[in-house]
């Protein structure tokens, strides 16, 4: 009988096809959105988009996915297991929008030069990369002291608010394509239905979406909106482009350092916590990966991409349990990296942007969001369910605020101009959304941890997390839109005091033997029957 160390893992399994297509289309959606932001929002020249940014991004993703495939191979070889699934990774989606709208667009608009915006984005990633590399050494300790329900609960909040909702809305805006594609995916990935010749469900869904969209566009039925002229113009971006150093552009962006650090530090911490959450998610699914190596790898590959001209950071993705449940193992990760490398180096992304309707891919993202939200409840004790719900709330607040801000901006106004009192009178508690949603991933983690420790009657640990919340809130890392100390009393001083009082109360409770009840309340309180 072979020892575990003598086991040679299989690099590709039939399930890798499903995971490759599902994960690959997920990455493809992000590439299409990212390219659209660069071209149509930032007005970036095509030679920069397809000749500098995408080639650097492609190399970054190839390095990242190859490294995580190697980590999975090493784990499978060491343990003798055949069910190890590689961590998914790619462009950080929240950061993609933040660096575009908060960093690059304002600077490009102020200077009238999109290249200046690009350079500022490179500096943003430069600092984020070092925060990740340094943070990797404290992440294992944070994972050790933080309850799983808190880590997975705040991750579920991200999945519901920022992964599931937009695809769900897109599906119901074009239901003739979206709902049918959703059904095609769900009957296979949840219902176990196999399509003829083992064709991946994701491929069937996207093929159906392409056919219906183009047919309805051809007959003017209004369901699809695909144009042949877009396909023809996309061929202009074909070519072979290798990444070249962009160190001079990185240093040019340092003139905007003051603006950049305001968001780079808190979002670097966001990356740190999100990566920990996703590693915890993988461990809950049975695959243990070293947190320090994961975070360091994210930082290193992001730095390489940045120095070659890519202003978008790499991140371990949410969704490992989803790809594993599809049968993904090792090969799907490396294959996705090769696919992205070819798409970016050959300029094929613009052609795909013109051929594939986004709504055909939306159900795949919704499915991943569903699994991550479910995992938080399935892999934690039932008694911790209230803590998971509490950890969700900051993300729902952040999502609602994002929609409100976008709506008001489109109308040429803002919440302050409309008036918070007027918004409150119609049920929109804007200030509450602003405070609760600020630093949502940290807020969700801390609130979830406090709740878990209260449920377990470990009041000293709950007090420690409440005290940590006071410190983080003082510096604006929780419940704040920017870091700092305000006028010396903290960014949101009332909340700092409130968390401090909560910590004192919980600490005092932990030091006394006085207990109101010796019985725990039931996980699900029974309701009195209606008369």
Image (cartoon, helix red, strand yellow):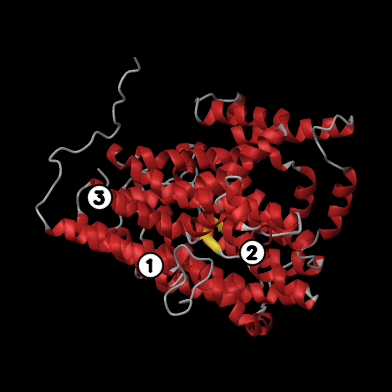
Q: Is residue 8 visible?
A: no
Q: Secondary structure at mark 1?
A: helix
Hey, which quadrant is residue 259 in on the image? Answer: bottom right
The percent position of residue 381, horizontal first and vertical second, equals 28, 40
Name the residue beneath numbered marker 3.
454
Numbered circle sitting on residue 68:
none
- Closer to the chain start, of discs 3 and 2, is 2
Q: Nearer the viewer, mark 2 or mark 1?
A: 1
Query: Is residue 131 shown above or below 439?
Result: below
Left or right placement of residue 46 versus residue 204 in this view: right
* Front: mark 3 or 2: 3
* Residue 98, horizontal then vertical, whole percent: 61, 63
Q: Could you tell me which residue is drawn at 43 percent across and 51 percent down?
A: 154
Give the camera-side residue of 170 and 233.
170
Q: Which residue is mark 2?
A: 57
Disc 1 + disc 3, Cβ < 8 Å = no
State which tag comes first along the sequence, 2 or 1.
2
Image coordinates for residue 131, horizontal then vertical, percent? 47, 73
The residue closer to the viewer here, 426 or 202, is 426
Front-most of residues 418 and 376: 418
- As drawn, 153 above or below 502: above
- Spatial CA distance of label 1 from label 3 is 20 Å
Residue for badge 1: 496
Q: Residue at x 77, y 32 (%)?
A: 211
What is the crowding at mark 1: few (fewer than 14 residues within 10 Å), some, or many (at least 20)? Answer: many
Q: Position of residue 339 (x, y in %)?
A: 64, 52
Q: Quadrant of the N terminus?
A: top left
The secondary structure type at the circle numbered 2 is helix
The reply to whether dot 2 and dot 1 touch (C-beta < 8 Å) is no
């Amino acid at each position: 009988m072979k020892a575990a160390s003598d086991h040679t893992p299989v690099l590709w399994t039939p399930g890798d096809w499903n995971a490759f297509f599902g994960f690959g289309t997920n990455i493809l959606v992000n590439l299409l959105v990212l390219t659209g932001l660069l071209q149509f929002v930032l007005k970036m020249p095509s030679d920069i988009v397809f000749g500098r940014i995408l080639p650097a991004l492609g190399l970054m993703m190839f390095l990242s996915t190859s490294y995580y495939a190697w980590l999975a191979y090493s784990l499978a070889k060491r343990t003798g297991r055949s069910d190890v699934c590689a961590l998914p990774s790619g462009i950080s989606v929240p950061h993609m929008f933040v660096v575009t709208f908060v960093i690059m667009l304002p600077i490009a608009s102020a200077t009238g030069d999109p290249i200046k915006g690009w350079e500022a984005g490179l500096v943003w990633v430069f600092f984020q990369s070092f925060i990740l590399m340094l943070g990797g050494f404290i992440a294992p300790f944070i994972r050790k002291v933080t309850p799983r329900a808190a880590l997975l609960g705040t991750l579920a909040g991200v999945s519901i608010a920022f992964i599931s909702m937009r695809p769900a809305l897109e599906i119901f805006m074009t239901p003739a394509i979206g709902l049918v594609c959703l059904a095609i995916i769900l009957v296979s990935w949840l219902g176990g239905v196999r399509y003829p010749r083992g064709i991946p469900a994701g491929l069937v869904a996207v093929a159906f979406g392409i056919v219906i969209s183009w047919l309805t566009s051809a007959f003017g039925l209004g369901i699809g909106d695909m144009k042949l002229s877009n396909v023809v113009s996309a061929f202009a971006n074909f070519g072979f482009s290798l990444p070249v150093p962009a160190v001079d552009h990185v240093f040019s962006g340092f003139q905007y350092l003051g603006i950049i650090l305001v968001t780079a530090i808190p979002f670097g911490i966001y990356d740190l916590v999100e990566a920990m959450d996703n590693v915890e998610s993988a461990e809950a699914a049975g695959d243990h990966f070293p947190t320090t190596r994961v975070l360091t790898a994210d930082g290193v590959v992001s730095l390489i991409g940045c120095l070659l001209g890519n202003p978008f950071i790499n991140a371990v993705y949410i969704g490992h349990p989803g790809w594993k449940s599809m049968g993904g193992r090792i090969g799907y990760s490396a294959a996705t990296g090769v696919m992205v490398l070819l798409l970016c180096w050959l300029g094929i992304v613009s052609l795909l942007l013109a051929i594939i309707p986004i709504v055909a891919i939306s159900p795949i993202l919704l499915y991943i969001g569903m699994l991550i939200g479910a995992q938080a409840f399935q892999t934690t004790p039932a008694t911790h369910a209230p803590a998971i719900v509490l950890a969700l709330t900051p993300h729902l607040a952040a999502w609602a605020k994002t929609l409100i801000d976008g709506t008001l901006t489109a109308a040429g106004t803002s919440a302050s101009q409309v008036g918070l009192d007027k918004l409150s009178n119609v049920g929109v508690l804007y200030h509450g959304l602003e405070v609760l949603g600020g630093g949502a991933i940290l807020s969700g983690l801390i609130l979830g941890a406090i709740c878990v420790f209260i449920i377990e009657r470990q009041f000293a640990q709950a007090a420690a997390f409440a005290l940590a919340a006071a410190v983080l809130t003082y510096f604006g890392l929780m419940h704040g839109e920017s870091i700092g100390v305000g006028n010396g009393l903290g960014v949101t001083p009332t909340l700092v005091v409130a968390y401090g009082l909560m910590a004192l109360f919980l600490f005092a409770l932990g030091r006394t033997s006085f207990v109101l009840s010796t019985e725990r309340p039931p996980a699900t309180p029974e309701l009195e029957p209606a008369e």
